[in-house]
Image (cartoon, grey):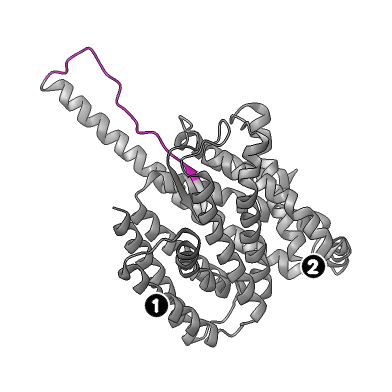
Amino acid sequence: MATMKKVVLLALAASSASAFAFSPRANVGSSVKTFNGVPKAASFAKTAPSTSLALSSTGGAAAVAEEDSGSDLAETLKVGSYFALWYLFNIGYNIYNKQALNALAYPWTIATIQMATGILIFGPLWLTGLRKAPKLSGDDLKTLLPIALCHTGVHVGAVIALGAGAVSFAHIVKASEPVVTCGANALLLGEVLPAKVYATLLPIIGGVAIASMKELSFTFLALASAMLSNVSSSLRGVLSKKTMSGKKIGENMDAQNLYAVLTAMSTLILIPLMLAIEGTGFLGAFKSAVEAGSFTNKSLSTLLLLGGATYYLYNEVAFLALGKVNPVTHAVGNTIKRVVIIVASVVAFKTPMSTGSIIGSSIAILGTLLYSLAMNSVKK
C-alpha cells in the first residue's frame, strides 16, 4: 500500500499540472516541435473572450490591470512548479535507477520495468476518462513504430550507461547529443546549418573528451551505451520530422498521449529483447539481494516502481515546461538541470570527480547551452 501511495502521489503531481497545460488538446498535425527528439503536438494560441460591455477608463482599466497582474503571477507560479517537478522527478529517477542497478545488474530488465510502469500511470487516466484515450489506425502505428524503436534505444542505452559507470559520467557523455544530432540531420535530411552552430560543437567534443580521459570511473561500456542513447535520440528526432511533419496521427494525440503511446510500444519491444538477452535471471538476483539482507521484497519492489514512475513523470513534466516557456528559457533550464543532476549524483553516491573531469564536463555543458542558443537564433 505504501508503494502505491507514493506512485499515486507522483502521478497526481504531474496530472494536476497537465490539467492546466494541455487544455484544449491539439492533434499532431501542421506543426511538430520536439523535446529530446519526441514530437510535441502544436499548441493553439489562446484568444481573449470578447465582451459587449465597454470598460470605463478608470475602474474597468484598473480591474483589468489587477486581473492581468494576478494571472501573470499565477502563470509564473505554474511554470515554476513545472520546472521544480521536472528537476525533482529527474533527480529522483537517476538516484532510484542507480540504486536499483547497483543491487541488480540486469539493465535490460530494469529498463523494461521502468518503461512498463508508465502504463500504470496513463492507463487508469484513459480508462477513467480523466484523459481522452488516443484512437490510432494500423497505418498510424506503422508510422510510429520506427520512432518507438528509437525511443527504446534512448532509454535502454541510458540505463546500461548508468549501470556501467557513474551517473555524472553518463550525463557528461549525454551532453554530446547535439553533435550526433547535427550529423544525423546533415546525412538524413540534408540540413546544413550556419557555421556558428557548428562552432558550438567544438567545446562539446573537447569537453567530453577531456572528461572521458580524466574520469575516475570510466568504462568503455558506459561510453558506448551513452552514445547509443544519443544516436537513438537524434534518429528519433529525424524520423519524427520525416514521418510526422504536416501529417495528422490519430485522434486525441496531444504531446502527452503521444509520449504514452510510444511508452506502450517501447514496452512491447523491450519485453522480447529483455528475455532474449537476460532471460529470467533477474528473478534469482532479486531473491539473492533479499536473502543477503540488503533489501526486503517490499523495499526492492518499491525502489524499482519508483524508478519507473519518476522516469515517466519527469518526461511528462518536461513537456509541460517546454510548452510554457520560450526555447531560450528551456535551453537554460535544461542545462541547469544537467548540472543539478551531476551534483546531486556526486553527493548521493559520493562519487569522486577529478579536476579534469570537472573542467571537461563544465566545458561540454557550456557548449550544449551555446548550441541551444545558436539553434534558436537560426530558427528565428
Q: Which mark is residue 203?
A: 1
Pointer 2 local density, CA inside 10 Å: few below 14, some 14–19, many at least 20: few
Mark 1 / mark 2, whichever is N-terminal:
1
Amino acid under disc 1: Pro
The residue that label 2 is drawn on is 294
Q: Which residues are magenta?
A: 40-56
Magenta-colored stretch includes residue 255: no
**Residue under the image location 38 percent in, 62 percent down:** 372
Question: What percent of the width, then of the height, locates residue 332?
Answer: 37, 60
- Does 290 sit above or below residue 138? below
Mark 2: which secondary structure? loop
Does residue 120 show up?
yes
Verify CB contact (< 8 Å) between mark 1 and mark 2.
no
Q: Nearer the viewer, residue 255 or 70?
A: 255
Single out the residue that lies furthest toward the left: 57
Magenta-colored stretch includes residue 44: yes
Question: What percent of the width, then of the height, locates residue 76?
Answer: 35, 44
Mark 1: which secondary structure? helix
**Residue under the image location 35 percent in, 67 percent down:** 197
In the image: residue 353, left or right of residue 148: left
Question: What percent of the width, then of the height, locates residue 283?
Answer: 87, 60
Q: Nearer the viewer, residue 157 or 304?
A: 157
Rounded to the nearest angstrom, the CA distance separating label 1 from label 2 is 42 Å
**Residue under the image location 75 percent in, 62 percent down:** 108
